[in-house]
Amino acid sequence: EEDELLRLLKWKDADLKECIGLLRKEFNLNEKDLDSQIQALTGLGLTVTEQLNYVENALRILGFTKTFARLVLFCGHFSTSDNNPYESALDCGACGGNHGASNARALATMANNPEVRKALAKKGLNIPQDTHFIPGQQDTVTDEVILFDLED
């Protein structure tokens, strides 16, 4: 694998050693804490507690506290309008004209996290194992809904 990497990068062995040395120095990597350091560098960026807070607040605000369908859609919105004097209204001032796909994806991913589900159950939000959260996005002009990440 290392030989393949060197070939792809067109590096010599010394180049790889130099790169590893720079990464160790830049990210303070050491053998003792390597697993936790790699997790910190490659993780989602939010702890389970932070994910729990986002999901719990969203579910409570939306009124999802007791009965859950097998599929729950978290839907952001966007607009495909062109040359329309009402375009800014269709793109929604509340979100500054930004599309909601990334928010819907993040919330669905966190809500599907088994660790978050366990923590939610301790707070009285019991989500059935067969409930799956799906991210989507609604076009406010055509009312078309696009679903994302269905392969999960």
Image (cartoon, rainbow, N blue to C red):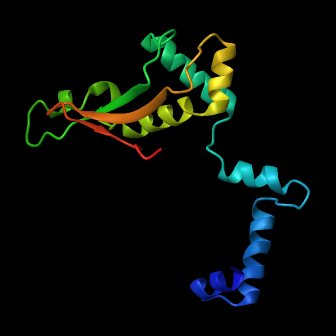
Residue at (78% x, 53% y) in the render: 37
- Residue 99, horizontal then vertical, whole percent: 32, 38
Asked whether 116 or 42 is in front, the reply is: 116
Is residue 128 or residue 81 the one in the foreground?
Answer: 128
State whether residue 128 is above or below residue 149: above
Quick one: quadrant of the N terminus? bottom right
- Give above or below for 64 relative to 17: above
Q: Is 39 positioned to the left or the right of 137 in the image?
A: right
> Going 80% across and 66% down the picture, which residue do you hit?
24
**Residue 96 can be seen, yes or no:** no
Near-viewer residue (129 or 94):
129
Q: Residue furthest right?
A: 32
Residue 57 rendering spot, x and y as whole percentages: 54, 17
Q: Is residue 125 visible?
A: yes
The residue shown at (59%, 15%) is 126
- Whether residue 38 sits left or right of residue 57 in the image: it is right
Q: In the visual, does 91 lie left or right of 62?
A: left
Answer left or right for 23 relative to 83: right
Q: State which quadrant residue 6 falls in.
A: bottom right
Up the image or down, 3 lies above or below 24; here it is below
Q: Quadrant of residue 18?
A: bottom right
Q: How many marks?
A: 0
What residue lies at 8% left-to-right and 36% top-to-bottom? Answer: 84
Image location of residue 152, percent across then percent down: 48, 44
Q: List x then y, in percent, for residue 148.
A: 37, 42
